[in-house]
Each structure stands twice: as C-alpha cells, then as structure tokens.
Image: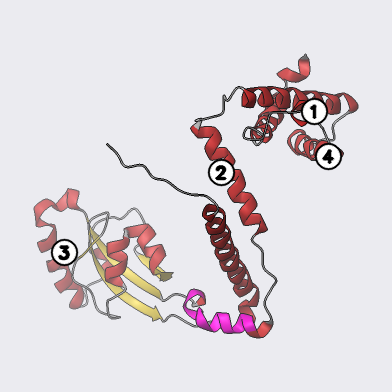
Amino acid sequence: MKIFRDPIMHFVLIGLALVAINHFWSGWQGEQGRTIVVSAAEIDRLEKIWAGTAGRLPTGEDRQQIIDQYVQEEALVREAGRLGLGEGDTIIRRRLAQKMDFLVGDDARADDPSDAALEDWFNDHRDRFAAPEMRSFTHVYFSPEKHGSRIESVADAARVRLQSGADWKAIGDPFIQKRSYAAVPEREVARLFGPEFAAAIFKLDARIWSKPVGSAFGLHLVRIEAIDSAAQAGFEPIRAEVLAAWQDEQRSEAKRAALEELIGQYEVVVETRR
C-alpha cells in the first residue's frame, strides 16, 4: 500500500519495532501468550508518536494502519521469542538493559528538601557553584613552521624587546585566532589552546611578559592583563540551580541503590578461564 512507502511510516514502524522488542524476554506459553491486547492507552501513545512525526493527527485509516502494524509486530516478536531468536543477541540485550535502566532511573525520585536542608547541602558543595577564575591576556605567537629549531631563541629575543617596551602588535607571527582575550575561564582557554597552555598561563603573575609557553599551535609569549578571582555565589540568587543539582544527585544515588538491590537478587557466578 502507498502508506507503507511513506517515509513517515518508516519512522513509525521502527518505533513500533523497538517497543515490541521489550517483550522478547516475556513468557510465551499459555493462553495469555496467544492474546494480543491493544489497549486504549497504547493506541493513544502510538497516535502521539505518529502525530509528532507526521505533524498532523492520524486519520481513521492512519489509525487502523498503526494498530494493524502494532499487531503484526507483536505477533512476530512473540513468535521469535517463543523460538528463542532473541537469546544471545547483543543488540537486543543492550536495548532491553537501556530500557530497564531508564525505568529504574525514572522511579528514582525524591521529594524536594526544605529550604534549610537545601541551603545546608549548598554550603557543603559551594565549590560546585563558584564562578571560576577569569583571566584577560595578550599573547605573541611564534610559528614552528617558520622558525623550526630556532623558535625558542627567537621567542626569547622577542621577550627581551617586549620587556623593554616594544609594541607587541609588531612582534611575532600571524595567528589564526585572536591575540587578546578578555575575562576567559581556564576551560575556555584549554579549548582554544590546549590544556597545558591553559594550566601554565593560569599560574602567571599579571602585567609581566612570560617565558615562552607551548600550545597546540607553537610557542607564545603571554602577558596577563587582569585576573578576576573565583567568586563564591550566594544561595538565594542561584536557588533553582542548586535545587536542580540536588535533584540530580538524589536521582543518581537512588538509582545506584536500586541497581544494587536489583543485582543483589541474583547469584552471580563468574567462571574462570581455562
């Protein structure tokens, strides 16, 4: 039929197949295994998926196609499960584990703390909410392609000139990025120049031309123009951010405990290699 050639339906069918995978490890024996129930809630859910993909509500014909495809997929999946086709399939195992992991995480919820409890938690984790130290700096670049083995001596000679008051804009080689940066944190400097360069310039004193500092590009002479020290934030202005961080931590801890409890229900036997 034409609708099965529609790319939209391809996405829907893939979604239905993934939903059906969840039943691979269910029981396939008895009367219940021969009854396919398409509940009203399931139809609503599938229609929402279809509408989100198609950008419109499904017609009556679309709705019937969705149901028919679900029934077909369910029947095929159940038969495959009865035949044991899913056993040992790494992709299916991972998909089911991911689904279960999501369900465990979704159940791992805690009531919001009182203001006093949240503020106490904030005080114990202040470093997580501190504004990072920022540095403004100017650098003069020296290209290894241009100077080769002489690059360090060239940079050292240029540093002497800079310390004597020479115009930094007239010294060094062209650079693909900026030569001056204002109020940037270490992580941004690391992204632009590499972590070793960032760590080095965040140890420099201000207003002094440094010795040559290596980066992913070559060598640089760096002068720190200003240092904005790390600042501790107050609780009230960032209360929403603190609450979100607390909730994330609680979910992670609850999920970890739930997984430990789940695994604890099994006897784990690890065979030694021969």
Give the vertical position of 44 relative to 166 (above or below). above
Q: Which amino acid does label 3 sit on?
A: Ala
Q: How many marks?
A: 4
From the viewer's perspective, is the residue at label 2 or at label 4 nearer?
2
Alpha carbon of mark 3 to alpha carbon of mark 2: how far? 56 Å
Counting residues from the start of the chain, the first of labels 3 and 1 encountered is 1
Counting residues from the start of the chain, the first of labels 3 and 2 encountered is 2
Circle 2: element type: helix
* Residue range highlighted in magenta: 117-128
Alpha carbon of mark 4 to alpha carbon of mark 1: how far? 20 Å
Q: Position of residue 242 (x, y in %)?
A: 60, 74
- Residue labelled with disc 1: 35
Residue at 35% of width from left, 62% of height from top?
A: 190
- Residue labelled with disc 4: 44
- Residue labelled with disc 2: 97
Q: Position of residue 54 (x, y in %)?
A: 76, 33
Residue at 18% of width from left, 52% of height from top?
A: 144
Counting residues from the start of the chain, the first of labels 2 and 4 encountered is 4
Counting residues from the start of the chain, the first of labels 4 and 1 encountered is 1
From the viewer's perspective, is the residue at label 3 or at label 2 nearer?
2
Q: How is the image coloured?
A: secondary structure
- Residue labelled with disc 3: 155
Q: What residue type is labelled 4?
A: Asp
Residue 235 visible: no
Counting residues from the start of the chain, the first of labels 4 and 3 encountered is 4
C-beta proximity under 8 Å, tags 3 and 2: no
From the viewer's perspective, is the residue at label 3 or at label 1 nearer?
1
